[in-house]
Amino acid sequence: PFSVGSHGSSFAHRSELRQAKRIVVKLGSAVVTRGDECGLALGRLASIVEQVAMLQNQGREMMIVTSGAVAFGKQRLRHEILLSQSVRQALHSGHNQLKDMSLPVLEARACAAAGQSGLMALYEAMFTQYSTCTAQVLVTNLDFHDDEKRQNLNSTLQELLRMNIVPIINTNDAVVPPPEPNSDLQGVISIKDNDSLAARLAVEMKADLLIALSDVEGLYDSPPGTDDAKFIDIFYPGDQQSITYGTKSRVGIGGMEAKVFAMLKKILVFLQVKAALWALQGGTSVVIANGTNPKVTGHVITDIVEGKKVGTFFSEIKPAGPTVEQQTEMSRNSGRTLASLHPDQRSEIICHLAELLTERQEEILAANKMDMDLAVNAGHLPPAMLNRLSLSPAKLNSLAIGLRQISVAAQDSVGRVLRRTRVAHNLELEQVTVPIGVLLVIFEARPDCLPQVSALAIASGNALLLKGGKEAANTNHVLHKLTQEALSMHGVKEAVQLVSTREEVEDLCRLDKMIDLIVPRGSSQLVRDIQRAAKGIPVLGHSEGICHVYVDANASIDKVLKIVRDSKCDYPAACNAMETLLIHRDILRTPLFDQIIDMLRTEIHAGPRFASYLTFSPSEAKSLRTEYGDLECCMEVVDSMQEAVDHIHKYGSSHTDVIITENEDTAEQFLQQLDSACVFWNASSRFADGYRFGLGAEVGISTARIHARGPVGLEGLLTTKWVLRGDGHTVADFSEHGTMKYLHENQPVGQPLAGQRDSN
């Protein structure tokens, strides 16, 4: 599973870091030491050891380049000096004077000598908890310049790794000489600090990955803290002219004081980036990240190895297209222009897209055939997913019809006045509809979703990021190209972006400053994963589609058989398919009961009460809250309509629930009492769909309690803003001694107010 010594070229993408076998972890002084730079950060160090041991036990070869000997030695020597003070002097001085007693300046090499053995003993004790053996290796710059010493070092480390031992490497600060000024100008990097040591070691040992941990987040394109500063997620060598540290380093090289750090900051940046680039050119991938942030410290190393967006990743291969962040920025900017278009213009774009779906049908179906052939040959998609992936002339025709419905609705969407109030004389307030902003829609193997969602976003003036399943890559590419062609007619081509990079969905969910709403469309597992991964971004969706059909005592036999069959069998993989059938107790052992059983006999999972009434033995339902997604369902018995409502509230998912009855009063009580996004009377649950509701299409189905619920069409992609038009009004005008009074008069929304004032 791992790529051993994949040298000559480093990994091009973060996702490939999972393959790294030989990994060097560099721990800067700020990571290893406490805030007072005297003593070790034991909790942080324990977390790092745990992560390294876990990766080692996975079969990877881990090496640690560590700082901390000087700090540990400083702590020990200070303690010894205090103890060496005479007891008499200590007693004579008094407690406060002893507390404030000045200590001599401690020489760094002496501190290193005193601290190296203790630091190693600590590492050994921590790794022993995970049945992992360690070995200490002390090096100096000369060990890399002398060929024999370098070869011996290489041989020693190779043997340690072969024996599944974690080498703990640090510079021998007790004897290390100053670096030679120009020795790194002929392709040899000097060992000036642990960054350069880690880089040199990683290349020497043909490591796949170097993780450099310090107290900085990574690199920024301008000084962090400034308004325009942007974090550099991936750094390419050609961009090195415009970088700076994520935050001011607390310790840095030699424990620099804050007042001199500002002068040397550029030098520090140059040294760390130079070491990283040197390792990159030697074939080792590099990530610079923060090892001190308590929010991520517990997982920073393993997250990096899993390919997550942590720190700055160095890559030699720059993708041809824009990054997802750049795509989001382009989409937002173009989306604002889209929102400012006249409604007729947005409607024209959607109509043109509908025309392209029929005019370019052959091109679309050819791309879809490529995806279908690949999926069939791979053999990993179930029939239901293959059905979703497949397009046909009939599907494209239905898509075009739905888009034209949306184009009509687009005429009255953005800028619609919902409420109008005359606050006071010549002070008029309006509540108007506006787009949400930037939408991220994630969908699986269902390419017809792309034009539907695009049309809804265009109609509502929203910018849109689309992340489709790789199974439909060819079809999605063609459909997105046609969407941008339609958008081009009014100069807003970039408003809809298709994310086709290697970005993980979890990484997209972290763009909380750029994305306003995430809409996952697909399996319940996908929705749950997105809801967990979203970092500060609202998610519109449903985690499960546990839909119920309740057959009342007064139900029509014909209606029951038609509705139950359609709800379960029309498309069992859909989220609006029936998963639980509730039947009234009075229907048991009636002809209707027998017909239901005959229709569903091979598909039944019996609930606790229902099993006791049967003459045959169906499988027992493991849970009354199960989404089967196939030709199977749960059946249970209830004593009344109220018990059915209670059962649905307890076990349902608030998606879509149905009552079948001829008793109007019973039906109305069910419709009023049941708290689900969709509640139906004598109709199949499969009607819970944007197209069938006349919305043209849906961006998804929501079971949330706020904003939109059920099939979410155009209205669900709008929010509101308040527009106040005054004439020099101030709040002071309405004070006790002011000259104005509040009116708060509701005005008809159809009455034109913009630009008009009272004539009096």
Image: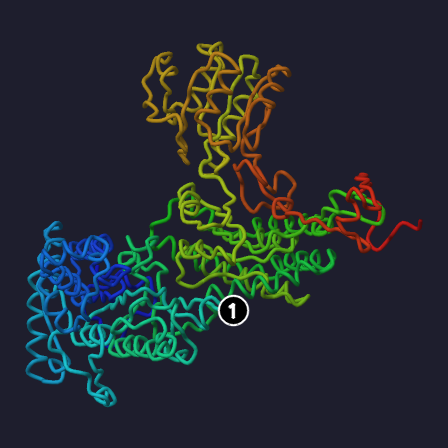
Residue 96 vs residue 111: left or right? right
Q: Residue furthest front?
A: 92
Residue 114 in the image: above or below residue 408: below
Callout 1 crowding tier (Cα within 10 Å): few <14, some 14–19, many ≥20: few
Q: Residue furthest right?
A: 760
* Rendering coords of residue 521 (x, y %): 48, 46
Residue 343 lies in quadrant: bottom right
SS of the residue at dot 1? loop
Residue 572 lies in quadrant: top left
Looking at the image, which residue is at 73% across and 43% down?
418
Q: Quadrant of the N terminus?
A: bottom left
* Rendering coords of residue 47 (x, y %): 23, 53
Camera-side residue: 706 or 491? 706
Query: How is the model colour-coded?
Result: rainbow
* Rendering coords of residue 101 (x, y %): 21, 61
Looking at the image, which residue is at 80% across and 41% down?
742
* Rendering coords of residue 391 (x, y %): 51, 52
Residue 729 vs residue 153: left or right? right
Res 689 seen here: no
Residue 732 vs residue 705: left or right? right
The total number of labels drawn is: 1
Residue 185 vs residue 367: left or right? left
Residue 105 in the image: above or below residue 47: below
- Name the residue carrying label 1: 228
Camera-side residue: 503 or 274? 274
Res 632 seen here: yes
Camera-side residue: 81 or 559? 81
Residue 236 lies in quadrant: bottom left
Q: Amino acid at mark 1?
A: Asp
